Image (cartoon, rainbow, N blue to C red):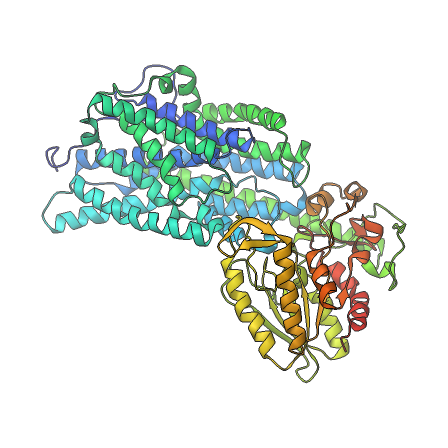
Amino acid sequence: MTSATMTVPRERDRPSGSSTTGSAPPGFRRDIQGLRAVAVALVLLYHAGVPGLPGGYVGVDVFFVISGFLITGLIVREIERTGRLSLTRFYARRARRLLPATALVFVAVAAVTAAVLPVSQWRDVASDMVASALYVVNWRFADLSVDYLAADTATSPLQHFWSLAVEEQFYVVWPLLIVGLLWWARRRSGPLSRGRLALGLLVIAVPSLAWSVHLTSADPGRAYFVTTTRLWELTVGALLAVGLTRVGRLPLVVRTALGWAGIAAIAAAAALFDVSTPFPGLAALLPVLGAAAVIAAGTGDGRGRLAPLELAPMQDVGALSYSLYLWHWPVLIGAQAFWGTPGEPLRVPTALLAIGFSVVPAWLAYRVVEQPFHTSTLLAAPRRALAAGLVCILVGLVAAGALVLAADRRLATEQAAAQTLGQTHPGGRVLGLDEPPADWAPDDRSPTGYLPTPSLIGDDVGALAGEKCIGPVRAEDVELCDYGDPTGPTIAVVGDSKMHQWLDALQQIADRRGWHLVTMLQSACPFAHVTVVDREDAPNDACRRVNDVRIDAVLADDAIDHVLLSQASQVACASPDSCARQSRKVMRGALEDVLRDLTDAGRRPVVVADNRKPDTDMIACVASHEDDVSACEFRLAVEKRPTLIQAAERTGTPVADMQPWITPGNHGWPVIGGVTVYRQGSHITATYARSLTDVLEQQLVAAGLP
């Protein structure tokens, strides 16, 4: 292949970790180094919670464009020079460049996790580490984003690896596609032109952008993390690299205007976007095209480059950008463990101090690990570099394994301690069947040997005969479970996860009384013809569709004798198409309608009152204060009567209220009768729910159940 066949941009760049000292290589783009500084600064300040940058997360999108541009430039130059692309050399460069630094972070995260994070998080961090080492962690976080029962869990110290995983997956797909294009070009006896490369990129970009727009609307939590909604951002940079020569021919005034317009677009996105902005979707076009415009401005003779980006401080920060990105988040999580309140972000000054401190490990890692490995002559041979990369991946896997072993050892110690103490763990049974007095207090406010142990609190989730029996958020189909004597009275169990938490107790009651249980539970979905918001503040259309099915099914099934329902939602969207305004009145009216419809159909509904939410993350609190759980006590503030209770009173529907046995006297005790009370959010542990079986049975029978 000759240079006449493919005109390749002359601009060359070095990896983000290269030194800013000494003479720069020919063609080095100082403006891109400065753009890296802008991107990492936005991310760091956003994570610190600095006011005025609610959309600072777009710094990641700027990184995507830069990466696509630089990687494609390297590939194109190799094709021009040799007429082929060596996948071995390509992946060896990536391994030498990226993996040693990440291996060091994995070791540090494992050590810090064991030292300062609650034991309840160790296994989750280990799972995140395995997925991060294999560069698929973004898919793991996408799955967790739709798992309501995993909501409100502590943030992972490796959560920032999701964007690195997206980039690495692009580095796998794009070179393979180029090799395919090269093979196709040879079969046709023609050269691999820039036009064919651009066509290959468009094959990736156009479907990815379309899918990003769709999924951002349909499932925003998943859309944020998955690779398929982000590939187009990297291909924008890649397309710029392929067509750079033509862009460089633009008049200087146009290129200069592009550069400043690009910076303005990035700044506007950082200032105007926030967590409620549907993202990535079409909104991501603003920072992505802005970054592409800044890069385009510096093409050709280079006179369109933005001078502020080439200042020495910008060069220094840009050189450290990869290392800063790797280290700042684990340092922030460690600071949260030391000085933060569970479930609440760090105060901005504290977060900024943590960000400032992260410069120290970032600089040391850059000088001691990142640069030496990147410039090592020993690793210049591709096979050695790939072998070193494999070792780095194994380091992450071994660190994760060590964390799991430590968690298992800790769990064994906790269980042995509980057995040695000989506690019977009566849980809520110590409160008796009558409502506890307002001044009730446990004999030991900070017991030891309680169950579930800190290692298992988060996994102590309700189930029916071992089955989860609840549909995830935004599921389209009704999750149906059937249990008990089919000839006995049929009880339909409906609502959301606040009804689901009682499944273990209901199973025991069904065994005693010969009930036939039929469950139709959906996470974050109240049992009413109403629209509620999902976790991204968008209308939960899936919940509405599920309710159309399950409400009609219950009303039409004459075999159902009673209906048990509970929910957490207090408000509903005033409009089915928009949740900009939410109303208790709308929710109450919808609940009154469904309760009356159930009564008119002979289904005899019973409401199980929702229990109140603690003012802190109880899993993290108990795990952090396992030797003095009294630090996690709380008082319930005075609040309006729950919407569901108001609807029940207005329709004459019986109510089973378990709140007095969960927070006796409106005082929240983390451990009652040797059993930890709370798990995720306001949900109680399955163990504590089982301990209240007798009380729940008494309440339900009093409400009219057979």
Residue nearest the viewer, comparing 656 with 94? 656
Residue nearest the viewer, comparing 406 with 505? 505
| The quarter of the displayed image where residue 373 is located | top left
Tell me: 92 left or right of 276. Answer: left
Tell me: 96 left or right of 6. Answer: right
Instruction: Estimate the x, y position of residue 126 in percent, counting from the top left.
Output: 57, 46
The C terminus lies in which quarter of the figure?
A: bottom right
Instruction: Estimate the x, y position of residue 646 in percent, counting from the top left.
Output: 72, 59
| The quarter of the displayed image where residue 685 is located | bottom right
Residue 436 higher or lower than 257, as above or below: below
Taking the spot 37% from the left edge, 18% from the top edge, the residue there is 308
Residue nearest the viewer, comparing 178 with 616? 616
Tell me: 633 left or right of 323. Answer: right
Residue nearest the viewer, comparing 402 with 110? 110
The N terminus lies in which quarter of the figure?
A: top left
Residue 211 visible (yes or no): yes
Count of labels shown? 0
Instruction: Estimate the x, y position of residue 457 in percent, counting from the top left.
Output: 69, 52
Taking the spot 22% from the left edge, 42% from the top edge, the residue there is 198
Instruction: Estimate the x, y position of residue 488 in percent, counting from the top left.
Output: 70, 82
Taking the spot 80% from the left edge, 49% from the top edge, the residue there is 669
